[in-house]
Amino acid sequence: MANIGVFLERYTLTRSEEMGAVLRLGQVAQKLGHRLDILFRADMYKIPTYDALFIRALTDPLNSSYVAARLAEVQGLRVVDDPNSILVCCDKINMYRHLQAAGVPMPETLFLSEADITAQTGERLLDTLGRPVVLKAPNSSFSMYVDRVNTPEDFVRVGKRFLRRADRIVAQRFVASEFDWRVAVLGGEVLFVCQYLIPKRRWKVLTYTEGGRVIWGRVRNFDLNKVPPRLVEVAIQAAAAIGGGLYGVDLKQLGDDYVVIEVNDNPTICAGEEDLGHPEVYERLVRYLAREWG
């Protein structure tokens, strides 16, 4: 029997679908003969008493989740997400450099410093990468601090705003689509495949209105035996460039080929969404955490 801890922060409980997935994981763990406990920040001292730790909170080197991951790793636990994956994926520049070094297909991507944020550079990038160009702050998540620019003036305005968060930003060729592919990879194997549909009159899966309302795209699930082999191949290559844990690989489709937009550690798994049509997701997660494979 394995003792598995699930580390949560209280903000994780804002969506019933997220908590539903955690509860389902606990039910499956019990059915398989394992024990699963929910741990909060105040319970962090208990981590060394467990065999594995599964983090279901925002991962960032400045968050408590990273402290929990480091503690688990030092104690020899199997931990998802592992600290190195957090460090890589929470810095988009670091993440993209890993992908580039591994030869992963991706849109043309450049890294810009403060000296590059000029109207002249913006004009040149809009000419070479096409209009619009996507700008990203390296330490962004859930589509925040990701924007499109169509003019040199917008390039300077958005670039300077993003540089308040970092000393470099990302410029990337825009790939238009009606959806993003999401391939979850666990221990080098595909866990589930779905599409995040882009809402009408939007260009991102997740956007925020000026009033603070969040607009999400719907989730469309796919049978693992019926997804294009090339999609799986590229996703596994991208995940391997980061590590051997759990990743959500976001891809755009270009004809019969695919480009990786980014690799996320700690990918979203919500009851009735990503797990729909994939009931085996929870069993595979439990068996991985219990070191029955991988």
Image (cartoon, rainbow, N blue to C red):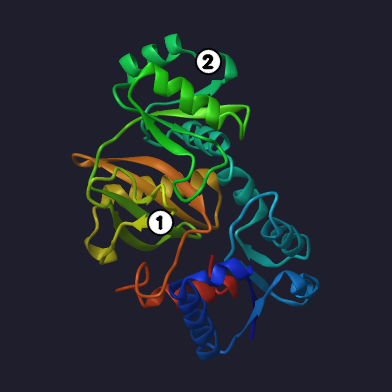
Alpha carbon distance from label 2 to label 1: 33 Å
Left or right of 273 in this view: 164: right
Residue type at mark 2: give it. Asp
| 216 w.r.t. 203: above or below | below
Q: Quadrant of the N terminus?
A: bottom right
| Tag shown at residue 182 | none
First in sequence, mark 2 or 1: give its number: 2
| Label 1 secondary element | loop
Left or right of 46 in this view: 166: left
Residue carrying label 1: 213
| 211 w.r.t. 128: above or below | below
Residue type at mark 1: give it. Arg
| 187 w.r.t. 283: above or below | above
Q: Position of residue 38 (x, y in %)?
A: 64, 78
Q: Camera-side residue: 3 or 216?
A: 216
Q: Position of residue 55 (x, y in %)?
A: 61, 65
Instruction: Please tell me which residue is depicted at 49% across the width and 48% down the height of the picture.
Output: 240
Residue carrying label 2: 116
Q: Residue furthest right?
A: 45
Whether residue 55 is visible: no
Residue neighbourhood size for the residue with mark 1, other residues' Cα within 10 Å, grouped as few (<14), some (14–19), many (≥20): few
Residue neighbourhood size for the residue with mark 2, other residues' Cα within 10 Å, grouped as few (<14), some (14–19), many (≥20): some
The image quarter containing residue 245 is bottom right
Instruction: Please tell me which residue is depicted at 60% across the width and 75% down the height of the picture.
Output: 290
Whether residue 201 is visible: yes
Left or right of 86 in this view: 228: left
Left or right of 108 in this view: 111: right
Of tags 2 and 1, the one toward the viewer is 1
Q: Residue furthest front?
A: 211
Q: Residue furthest top?
A: 120
